[in-house]
Each structure stands twice: as C-alpha cells, then as structure tokens.
Image (tube, grey):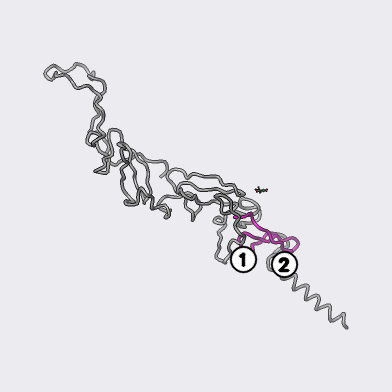
Amino acid sequence: MGVYTLLPILALFFCTVSAQRSNVQCKKENGLYMHEQYCDYYYECEDGVPKEKACPNGLAFSGKGRGLMQNCDYPHRVGCPDSDGRVMGQAPIGTDNCPWLYGVFAHQTSCTRYWQCWNGTATIQQCPFSLLYNDVLHSCDWPDNVPDCQKHPICKDQPNGHIPIEKSCGRFWLCVGGYPRLQRCPAGLAFSQTALRCELSQLVPGCEPPPTTPAPDDDDDKPAVSGNQVQGGEAPPRRSNARPAGQFRPQNGK
Ligand SMILES: *[C@@H]1O[C@H](CO)[C@@H](O)[C@H](O)[C@H]1NC(C)=O
C-alpha cells in the first residue's frame, strides 16, 4: 500500500519541479528564450532544460544568431528597457571611457565625437558633416535633435544668428539651433563686426582689399587704350555681381 500511495505523490512532485523548470522558459525542447527580468540574460534550452546565459557586458539578448555577437546586441537596438519591465541585470564593467565593456557612449566633452567600446577598448568616432552625437539614439543626429549640445558657448547669447570671429575678415560663426558652424564670406566680401553680415570688403574697416592696380597716372584726357586690352592687369571686380550678404557655402549633407 505504501508504495502505491507514494508513487503518485513522487510523480506529482517531479512533474511539478520539471514543469517549473522547463515550461516557464522552455517553450520548445531546444532554443533560446528571453529572461523574464533582464535584457542581458537569456535561457538556452537543451532537451527542455533551461540554462541561464549572460550576454557580453553591455549587450542585450537579441535572438538566436542575431545581433552583434553571442545572440546579443546593443540595448538600444534591442529595445531595453522594454515595456515588460526588463532591464539590464549585470553590473557594468567599466574601463577608461567605457561604462560597459560593449556599447556606444557619449564623449565627456565633445558633442561631435563618441566612443565605441569593444570588450572594454574604446575607439573614438567622429560624427560626419555637422551632425552631433545623440546619446538617446546612440548615433549621430541633426544638431536640433541633440538638446544637450544646444548651449554651445559660442552661441549662448544667440542660438540662431551670425557671430563674428575676432580679427577675421572672411570667417564667422553661423549659429543654428545653438550650435555653431564655421562659415566663410563669398569672395570680395568680408564679415562686418558691426552689421553682423558679409559686406563689400572695402566697406568693412580693417578688411579693405589691398590695391591691386597702381594709381593711374593723370591721363584722364588721353584717349583710352584701343582694343579690348585691359590696362594695369586685372580688372577690378564688378561689385554689382557680388552675392547677397550672409550667403554661405553649403555644407555636405542636408
Ligand atoms: C576581452 O578582453 C579580455 C582581456 O582584456 C580577454 O581575456 C578576452 O578574451 C576578451 N574577450 C573577447 C571576446 O575578445
């Protein structure tokens, strides 16, 4: 009798244990399954038995054979934290410039650069064109979308406008959304520190072009030189052709 009553109890006991271990995470006999709490852990099921696995430090489970390495990818690409409350569970292993061994991280002082960390080794990266590093997206973005970089010292008083550069005739800062872009006046124009725009060089004190032709002799009443030769080398630039003030060279990108 004892054996016949014990067996079902034992069977129930083992079934419950194995059900708890396998049915919760192992939907199929073999496969990889999300951890119920953490993005950077997952279960590898073998014959219905789950084994907990950790992603490389800083990466999150992305699926079997997917992602950067070892079934894991950057948390921002995977979507971690997620709406089910999963968060990173490992303690960050930091090295110089790398808060985690793997990841894309903001530079400490620069808005145009960022760190790419691979197994704790940081490589500096530069955003192309005039893009800035957006630490929410972990990628380069238009300056207007990067709120932390809006208050560049050059543009702090004027987030959108022209800022003179001391002693420079041709160059000036164009502040766009609080971030400066170096600009150059078109040929023949100079940046006026008072008008805050490009004007004819000879109208900007200190930026007058050097005379290229010697002062003509007093020969006003002599007949003009025949033919289409131009006396004295280059003709002075035609000012009526000057481009509008404030026009700047377009940059790469949009
Ligand atoms: C990461 O670096 C450590 C030592 O810094 C090394 O032992 C390990 O093999 C490296 N891992 C990978 C995946 O490169």
**Spatial distance from mark 1 to mark 2, Cα to Cα?**
17 Å
Image quarter of the C terminus: top left
The single residue placed furthest to the bottom in the displayed view is 1
Image point 86% across, 80% down: which residue? 4
Q: Position of residue 196 (x, y in %)?
A: 27, 44
Image quadrant where residue 21 sits: bottom right
- The stretch drawn in magenta includes residue 124: no
- The residue carrying pointer 2 sits among few (fewer than 14), some (14 to 19) or many (20 or more) residues within 10 Å by Cα, namely many
Q: Position of residue 96 (x, y in %)?
A: 56, 49
The vertical placement of 33 against 152, above or below, is below
N-terminal-most mark, 1 or 2:
2
Q: Position of residue 221 (x, y in %)?
A: 11, 18
- The stretch drawn in magenta includes residue 37: yes
Image point 29% across, 42% down: which residue? 246
Question: What element does badge 2 sit on?
Answer: helix
Residue nearest the viewer, comparing 128 with 112: 112
Residue on which the image places disc 2: 22
